[in-house]
Image: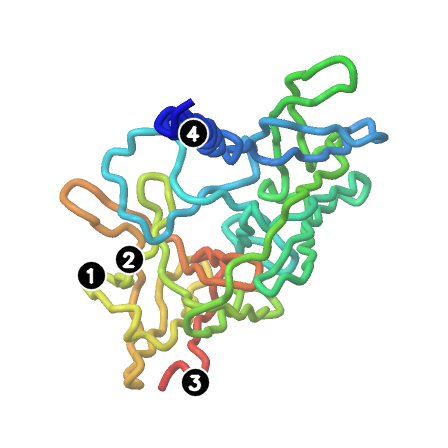
Amino acid sequence: MRWSSLIVLFGIALIAVRGDAGDKEKKEPEKAADKKPYLLVVPPAGGKEVKLADWRFTHGTRRLALTGDTPVNPKTKTPAGPEYLEVREEKTTTYKNGIFTFVPLTSVRKIDYDREKKTFSATVLSDGGAETTLLGSTKFTSNKITIEGEALLDGLGAATVKFNGGIDKGLHSVKFPDAKPADKLKGATAVVTADDKEKTKHTAHDVQPVFLVDGQYRVMAYVMFKKTVKIDWDNLAGLRFVPSEDKKKISTDYLVTLKDGVKHTLSILNTVELEKKKTMTFVGLIGRVPVGYKLFMLDAIYEYQLTAEEKK
């Protein structure tokens, strides 16, 4: 056999090897596109955990896209943004529109329910990676969940199921096997005082005004007061609720403190024009906390104050 023939055969072999390698490379992305991990659910009857595949929450979570562009005409019914577990913790006022904690679903390790005590607990990973337990009552609908998915039954196949948590005959617990720490805190530090008997104080970072636009929460760089007062949030150092002297009347007045020390008593404007024939509703304040976000609904806010260092 001539050297030229050997070279040709060797070249064909190399091409074949490269072709096989190329095919493998093309198939790798398919392997990488894994489905989300199984959940482990202890069902209402108790006993052995049920492995849940292709699952989704239909109640108890919310998607947040706080800084995204406001969708004028949403094309899909599914809201944008990452999914968060919505939690109503202890000491978050008794108001229906109180204080909510949003934990990235990717940072949740376990959810437990005590059906006798009617309590809820969520074990989550904070920004530093430490386990944190959030406690609440199932009297708040935010602490109830509904999960739908496919239960993998040994030797039988998959069954379409729906589990409810926070009801009398609901599930006992849910485990999330691949929890990751929440994002690191950033932004200016502030203290929000709740409008409860104890005047409970909550520390948060990067606190901003939040509005409801097309059914989704959006942060804006300003807050509006009657009739046409617009204050940039970066110029504001404090905000304190001023109750009405007549207890039969609902007050919308707030003592506003600017960073230059000037103070004004102004009436908050709840409905704000976003664009022609389109409005948005002022909801309250939202800020970062070690486990995700805290939403302070307007009804639950007594006072907002930047820390002394941040006022400078």
Horizontal relation, residue 139 to residue 172: left or right:
left
Which residue is disc 2 drawn over?
269
Picture coordinates of residue 136 (x, y %)?
67, 51
Across and down, in percent, residue 124 comes to: 65, 53
Of the numbered discs in the image, which one, if any, rests on residue 309?
3
Q: CA distance from mark 1 to mark 3?
A: 32 Å
Q: Label 2 crowding class (10 Å Cα cut-off): few <14, some 14-19, many 20+?
A: some
Q: Amino acid at mark 2?
A: Leu
What is the secondary structure assignment of the residue under circle 3? Answer: helix
Q: Earlier in the sequence, mark 3 or mark 4?
A: 4
Q: CA distance from mark 2 to mark 4?
A: 79 Å
The first of marks 2 and 4 along the sequence is 4
Q: Residue at x 39, y 37 (%)?
A: 79
Q: Which mark is residue 227?
A: 1
- Residue labelled with disc 4: 10
What whole-number distance in Å separates the C-alpha atoms at marks 2 and 1?
A: 8 Å
Residue 269 in picture, x, y percent from top left: 28, 57
Q: Are marks 2 and 1 in contact (CB under 8 Å)?
A: yes
Mark 1 or 3, nearer chain start: 1
